Image (cartoon, rainbow, N blue to C red):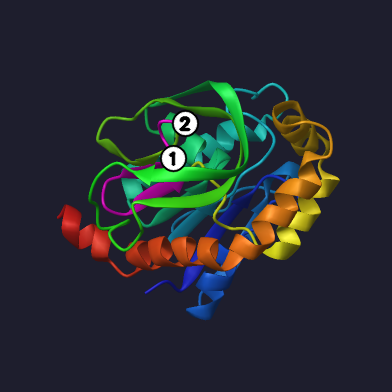
Amino acid sequence: MISRALVFQHMDNEPPGLFGEFLEARGARLDVVHLHRGQEIPSLAPYDFLLVMGGAMDVWEEAQYPWLKAEKAAIAEWAISRQRPFFGVCLGMQLLAEATGGKVGLARAAEVGIGAIELTGPHALTAGLAQHFRMMQWHHAEVTQLPVGAEVLASSDITPVQIMALGGNMVGTQFHGELTPELVKKWAEIPQYIEWLETSLGAGAYERVRTEALPLMPKMRKVSFYMFNALIGGKAQKAAA
């Protein structure tokens, strides 16, 4: 049972989204730390769940974003010492990888817009998903070396690590499964995201991607809901035991 969840947020327009809704529907209290606003990370001891969101910054930009050091230390403590359920989205997955001994670097190409994902093998966290599905992508960095003990659960043509599991209760996705229609609209307010999109897909790409994404939202929500429930419900922990 999840009673208190801690959220690390890196940008105003990258909130918990669907995962916050899922947690609140289970009666969990959400404490959101806005790292980009200078808020400090509290003691991890009272929390049952850690959710780490995405952001336009990269894991190696500690000089520009000095709070990344404290965040990585907290994620390492969570993963190594506390070993409670963790879900990381995009940057959140990359931070989990680096904090636990993996490596992150620039991808060979940016991956933005709706992209195809393929499962790489059976796992309790993804057992209910279709072999192929489509999700929103918006990144130019990727996990280049897995932490010891980590597994790749899904890949895309551009990015080998689309879903990463570490142990039985920590998972990250390179794609954005937190999205709601409102959040997709808010991304139009992030110049760096629009720049990445137009560099990859041409001028005016945002409106095309938004038009494609909105009808797919129910299917993308089902992917996120299943993975969340598999993680929280204990199926993955039992399978790994």
- Taking 110 as reference, is 98 left or right? left
- Taking 164 as reference, is 158 left or right? right
Mark 1 crowd level (few <14, some 14–19, many ≥20, 10 Å Cα): many
Is residue 148 in the magenta section?
no
Residue 119 pos. (x, y %)? 33, 46
Give the image quarter of residue 64.
top right
Residue drawn at point x = 44 percent, y = 44 percent: 117
Looking at the rendering, in which quadrant would you find the C terminus? Answer: bottom left
Residue 143 pos. (x, y %)? 45, 29
Residue 216 got which mark? none
Give the image quarter of residue 31.
bottom right
Residue drawn at point x = 78 percent, y = 31 percent: 202
Residue drawn at point x = 48 percent, y = 41 percent: 93
Q: What element carries label 2?
A: loop
Q: Is mark 1 on a helix, strand or loop?
A: loop
Location of residue 133 with respect to 225 vertically, above or below: above
Residue drawn at point x = 62 percent, y = 59 percent: 16
Location of residue 239 with respect to 222 vertically, above or below: above
Q: Which amino acid does label 2 sit on?
A: Thr
User: Does residue 43 appear in the picture of this structure?
Assistant: no
User: Does residue 61 appear in the picture of this structure?
Assistant: yes
Residue 159 got which mark? 2
Give the image quarter of residue 7.
bottom right
Residue 223 pos. (x, y %)? 45, 61
Residue extent of the magenta highlight: 159-173
Is residue 168 in the magenta section?
yes
Q: Tags 2 and 1 in contact by the CB under 8 Å rule?
A: yes
Mark 2 crowd level (few <14, some 14–19, many ≥20, 10 Å Cα): many
Q: What residue type is labelled 1?
A: Gln
* Residue position marked by numbered label 1 in the rendering: 162
